[in-house]
């Protein structure tokens, strides 16, 4: 069996979640998926955006960034350019939407949780890794609020994780690395809950259009991988 055949058969790349990676945030995680490494921190603020004041509901938002040498070619810091690029903004919004999708914002109350997701090494699947790692950081931030008697009820509806899945040379592959992603005819990013409900799908037929049957098959593969990721999340949180 070639190394690529072994990769296709195994599904996910090796995954490791390290909690409390940083000292000060209410939640912090280093998530490693193969060669991709992301740091996700969750910051709790005793306020909400102005447009949400008085509603009794909280807010969850996210910011995503690549370190300059997270990629093979150095990327200029966004602070030097003067603004985040469109890719970073789009991914930030995706992470925020995904995490809000599993939280009862009324049960959260008028607190804001900010997820900062920084890619320190990119080898494919960075946005999905940030959702998976960001969820664990969010869970710890909610634990912090509960332990400090700031929550009347637990606001988290269910677990959430995300994974990339694509078609490479006619075969479905989950958790694409950079090399596989560059050869993929079809590429999806899927965020899904523990019960199998889809929070978000981003998909592109980069090399060719894909059929409804292929879409269903890719979602089935993503679902199985997400179940594995949620198990790893729960193990890291001491819930299994």
Image (cartoon, rainbow, N blue to C red):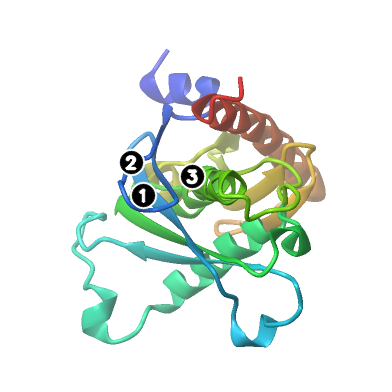
SS at mark 2 in the image? loop
Tag 2–tag 1 contact (CB < 8 Å) = yes
Residue at image mark 3: 133
Dot 3 and dot 1 residues touching (CB under 8 Å): yes
* Placement of the N terminus among the 4 image quadrants: top left
Residue 216 image-quadrant placement: top right
Circle nearer the viewer, 2 or 3: 2
Total of numbered circles in the picture? 3
Q: Residues within 10 Å of mark 2 (few under 14, many from 20)?
A: some
Residue 3 x, y percent position in the rendering: 37, 21
Residue 86 in view of the camera: yes
Above or below, 85 relative to 224:
below
Q: Earlier in the sequence, mark 2 or mark 3?
A: 2
- Give the CA separation, mark 2 to mark 1: 8 Å
Task: Identify the mark at residue 21; answer none if there is no mark.
Answer: 2
Q: Could you say whether the residue bearing mark 1 is in a helix, strand or loop? A: strand
Question: Nearer the observer, disc 2 or disc 1?
Answer: 2
Q: Nearer the viewer, residue 32 or 25?
A: 25
Q: Residue at x 69, y 57 (%)?
A: 200
Mark found first going from the N terminus, 3 or 1: 1
Side of 123 relative to 79 (left or right): right
Instruction: Name the residue at 68% across, 29% down.
Output: 224
Q: Is residue 180 left or right of residue 194?
A: left
**Residue 9 location, x and y as percent?**
53, 20
């Amino acid at each position: 069996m070639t190394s690529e055949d072994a990769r296709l058969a195994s599904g996910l790349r090796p995954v490791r979640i390290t909690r409390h990676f940083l000292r000060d945030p209410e939640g912090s995680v280093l998530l490693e998926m193969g060669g991709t490494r992301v740091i996700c921190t969750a910051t709790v603020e005793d306020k909400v955006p102005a447009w949400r004041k008085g509603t009794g509901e909280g807010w969850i938002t996210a910011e995503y960034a690549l370190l300059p040498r997270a990629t093979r070619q150095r990327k200029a810091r966004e602070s030097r350019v003067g603004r985040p690029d469109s890719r970073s903004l789009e991914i930030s919004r995706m992470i925020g939407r995904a995490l809000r999708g599993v939280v009862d914002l009324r049960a959260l109350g008028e607190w804001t949780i900010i997820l900062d997701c920084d890619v320190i090494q990119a080898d494919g699947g960075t946005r999905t890794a940030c959702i998976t790692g960001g969820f664990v950081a969010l869970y710890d931030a909610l634990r912090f609020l509960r332990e400090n008697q700031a929550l009347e009820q637990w606001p988290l509806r269910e677990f959430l994780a995300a994974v990339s899945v694509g078609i490479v040379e006619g075969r479905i592959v989950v958790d694409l690395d950079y090399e596989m992603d560059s050869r993929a005819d079809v590429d999806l990013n899927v965020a899904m809950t523990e019960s199998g409900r889809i929070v978000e799908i981003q998909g592109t037929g980069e090399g060719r259009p894909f059929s409804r049957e292929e879409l269903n098959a890719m979602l089935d593969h993503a679902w199985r991988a997400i179940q594995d990721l949620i198990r790893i999340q729960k193990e890291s949180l001491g819930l299994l």
